[in-house]
Image: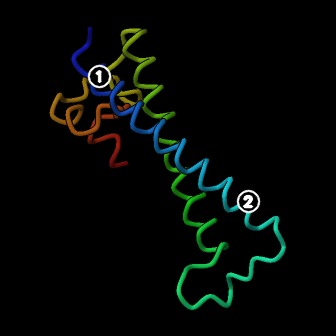
Amino acid sequence: MNPFEALLRARRAEILDAIGVSSEELAGIRFARSDGTADDEHDPEGSTLASDWSRITSMHATAVASLDEVDRALERIADGTFGTCVTCGNPIPDARLHVRPWADRCVTCAAL
């Protein structure tokens, strides 16, 4: 097994948990908004449903994008291209992969 596979699988599990939580929170906001009696705009103690929706939607989208990156890295492990820059074809240094095991570009190409 590729030594980075365990890191990626653990990260994938964390992301799936985050997606589950944000999905539940979004469902709760949808329900609160559908009520029609929710007057959160005048609640001085809390955030509005609109701001909560915006914040959680952004977090959810970030988690989904992260899951895609991790899944693509796992595919690269499976097909033997993990650790090779998709842009220039050079090896991605292990130091970079330890920090970002889902990285698909070397530092030079990622900076472009």
Between 75 and 51, the one nearer to me in the picture: 51
Above or below, comparing residue 68 to residue 72 in the picture = below
- Answer left or right for 89 relative to 55: left
Residue at coordinates 37% horizontally, 31% vertically from top-left?
104
Above or below, comparing residue 26 to residue 108 in the picture = below
- Answer left or right for 81 relative to 69: left
State the residue lying farthest toward the left.
Answer: 95
Residue 83 image position (x, y, % from top left): 29, 22
Report the disc number at residue 101.
none
Q: Indicate the quadrant where residue 11 lies.
A: top left
Discs 1/2, front: 2
Between 52 and 38, the one nearer to me in the picture: 38
Report the disc number at residue 83.
1
Residue at coordinates 62% horizontally, 88% vertically from top-left?
43
Q: Indicate the quadrant where residue 97 lies.
A: top left
**Label 1 vs 2, first from the N-terminus:** 2
Residue 52 image position (x, y, % from top left): 59, 69
| Mark 2 Cα-neighbour bin, 10 Å: few <14, some 14–19, many ≥20 | few
Residue 14 image position (x, y, % from top left): 39, 37
Of helix, strand and loop, which one carries label 2? helix
Q: CA distance from mark 1 to mark 2?
A: 42 Å
- Answer left or right for 22 relative to 112: right
The residue indicated by pointer 2 is 30
Of helix, strand and loop, which one carries label 1? loop
Instruction: Say what amino acid the circle numbered 1 marks.
Output: Gly
Residue at coordinates 42% horizontally, 9% vertically from top-left?
79
| Mark 1 Cα-neighbour bin, 10 Å: few <14, some 14–19, many ≥20 | many
Q: How many marks?
A: 2
Above or below, comparing residue 7 to residue 63 in the picture = above
